[in-house]
Amino acid sequence: MTERKPRKDAVRNRAAAFAAADTLFTECRSPEEVTMADIAAAAGVGKGTLFRAFGDRTGLIRALYAARLEPLRTAVGEGPPPLGPTTPPLKRVPALLDAVLCFKLDNRHLALALEGNGADSPYLTEHYESWHTLLRDLLDRVPGVAESDFTAHALLAATRADLVEYLAGVKGVPREELRGQLAKFSAGVLGSEA
């Protein structure tokens, strides 16, 4: 059976909703301020259109986050070094953490909206589980790293959206300084040079 192509207006509405949500989340003081009504108005669609397409605000945020994350996932799964699968673990782990940190810096309010979404734990999201599994498996191949499961959680905690927002947004730590601090931290955990 062939897969049905989405209608042109549905594709257009999805793109408009993503663009509106991107703008609203980027410009807001707090992600909680952005409502489905705000996104619908900015996208030029009805609220019902958004609810039919995404289910609810969390569904829209998850869909947008997944769309923004896809280039990074592709680079990790198929790309060249330092993120790609042919890179040795001692180089790939810090590169992966740096890429996740940069993604969170570039999509801070969207990441906060997803990770801080009331009933959902950020640890139960699909993307967290995939990053954790990848890191754990890489850490299993690094000599001297004990408890790879916990260590993967601890390394990912350094890229949590609320921490990134606190350091970059509240404390004003520059991007390159944050990246350098994360590189030193991961080198310490891995027992390698920064």
Image (tube, helix red, strand yellow):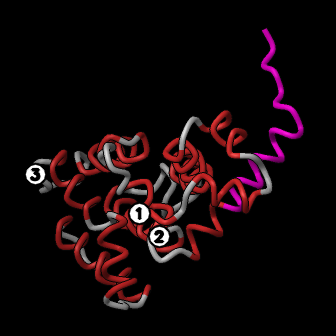
Badge 2 vs badge 1, beta-carbon distance below 8 Å: yes
The CA distance from mark 2 to mark 3 is: 31 Å
Tell me where residue 32 sits by quadrant. bottom left
Percent coordinates x, y for residue 96 in the rendering: 41, 61
The CA distance from mark 1 to mark 3 is: 30 Å
Outermost residue toward the right?
Answer: 8
User: How many residues crowd around disc 3 within 10 Å: few (fewer than 14), some, or many (20 or more)?
Assistant: few
Q: Residue at x 29, y 71 (%)?
A: 163
Q: Secondary structure at mark 1?
A: helix
Task: State which region is magenta.
Answer: 1-20
Q: Residue at x 38, y 48 (%)?
A: 131
Which residue is identified by label 1?
112
Percent coordinates x, y for residue 82 in the rendering: 49, 63
Which numbered disc, 2 or 3, marks the residue closer to the eye?
A: 2
Which residue is identified by label 2?
108
Which residue is identified by label 3?
146
Q: Nearer the viewer, residue 38 or 87?
A: 38
Q: Quadrant of the C terminus?
A: bottom left
Amino acid residing under circle 3: Ala
